[in-house]
Amino acid sequence: MARIPQEFRFDKVSIMTSSPNLQFVVQPGGKLTGRLRVPGDKSISHRSIMLGALAEGVTEVSGFLEGEDSLNTLRCFRRMGVRIEGPDALGAGRVRIHGVGLHGLRQPDGPLWLGNSGTSMRLMSGIIAGQDFDAVMEGDDSLSRRPMRRVTEPLALMGARIDTHEGGRPPLRVHGGSKLKGIHYVMPMASAQVKSCVLLAGLYAEGETCVTEPAPTRDHTERMLRGFGYEVRRVAGEGGSSTVCLTGGGRLTATAIDVPSDISSAAFFLVGASIAEGSDLVVEHVGMNPTRTGVIDILRLMGADIEVMNERVVGGEPVADLRVRGAKLKGIEIPESLVPLAIDEFPALFIAAACAEGRTVLTGAEELRVKESDRIQVMADGLVALGVDARPTPDGMVIRGGAIHGGTVHSHGDHRIAMSFAMAGLRATGAIRIEDCENVNTSFPGFEQLAHGAGLSIVSTGEAS
Ligand code: S3P
């Protein structure tokens, strides 16, 4: 019998807070030129550790993102008994995972720390639900505010038992020893994290597990499972929906993974070069998975000049070099069908909208309110602080392009907000100070140096903790 999803009272343990003392100061003007390569894809880096750990044999990863989020995933699997070499000892971006097989994880000796990373917590919930031990997962203030019922509810339907803090928030205690059974889950929202969580639990479930998504979301889990030799079936449905299925009880076989550069990190440079007159920048080796390229489509609709060059397939993922030149952008109504395909790029796209002529309208993006920060409110507050006409709505924003003044904005510890406002400096009339930038390291170590090298007048002040 299916267990009814329950919520348990769970007393929080040792929540750490990040210190909001690292600031970026960006002097106005400049342009972006040259060639650069941004760090590895965060979504693929997380999954390479998870599937590499659960595989039989040794998985070699190159291009791994050495950011705090994916490093937290790596540390957690080490604590569950997986031998992982690198990245430091093997050279930049190289990791070697000695897989323990689907049933070889060991109970960690204490709570698993996931920092700022929602992806780690949601995907690992599915994996740990299939183990025969209990584990606690906790994270920083931002992660502790994020909704987890979206994964605990389908997992409960599969037979898992998970305690949450009030309101379905972290920390989570996943109880081991449950016998999982396959379900057909129709997701209420377009979420790759929820889809991946259920599919990963499905590896341990009896019978078939299927997830129907209302609109296409990133498919790295499905692609990588296939790369590890696991059969995953996809059936197209009506109106853009589709269903992904797998059958539990199989095995994963180690493979090599070449992680492309993260299009979500490239996005800051695509926007920066587009808004700064005279820019001509090539961003190399960018992951071009069609479930991730909405940012290019939206920028092109706004009039951006982005050339896709040297397209190739690397390790099962499409990759290209992107040449972007300064252009006159115009405001648009962003098609809702592109929202899940650009879900992490809206902070940067809001900056593009602020520099465009006319009005840009975003709707159907209420998911932005439950990211690392409430990205609708936090971006609107920052834009208004810089003199931009930005009006938040429950599911999006209306921005009228115009002048960007200097001023101080608060990133609320959200990496993508910090980097987006840094790019706004290219078009500002005065210096922009951005507070609380330490979490840029979660997804983009070296951002300041790379952006500076391309022509952004950025310095950091204060101390990272
Ligand atoms: C991710 C999925 C997206 C995205 C996040 C990474 C993933 O989240 O915002 O940064 O790796 O599966 P949702 O599934 O909540 O949309």
Image (cartoon, rainbow, N blue to C red):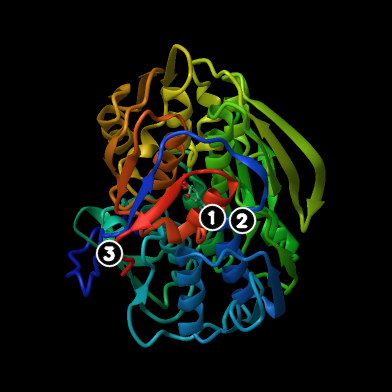
> Looking at the rendered structure, which numbered label has been put on residue 18?
3
- The vertical placement of 78 against 402, above or below, is below
> Does any atom of ligand 1 lie closer than 8 Å to the CB of label 1?
yes
51 on left or right of 401: right
Which residue is label 2 attached to? 221
Mark found first going from the N terminus, 3 or 2: 3
- The picture places residue 280, in percent across and down from the top left corner, at 67, 34
The image position of residue 369, as x and y in percent, is: 32, 39
Q: Residue furthest top?
A: 358
Could you tell me how far apart the alpha carbons at marks 2 and 1 are, in whole angstroms?
6 Å
Q: CA distance from mark 3 to mark 2?
A: 30 Å
Which residue is at 46% across, 23% downward? 355
Does the closest atom of ligand 1 sit within 8 Å of the Cβ of label 2? yes
Q: Secondary structure at mark 2?
A: helix
Circle 2: residue type:
Thr
Residue at left offset 67%, top offset 64%: 63
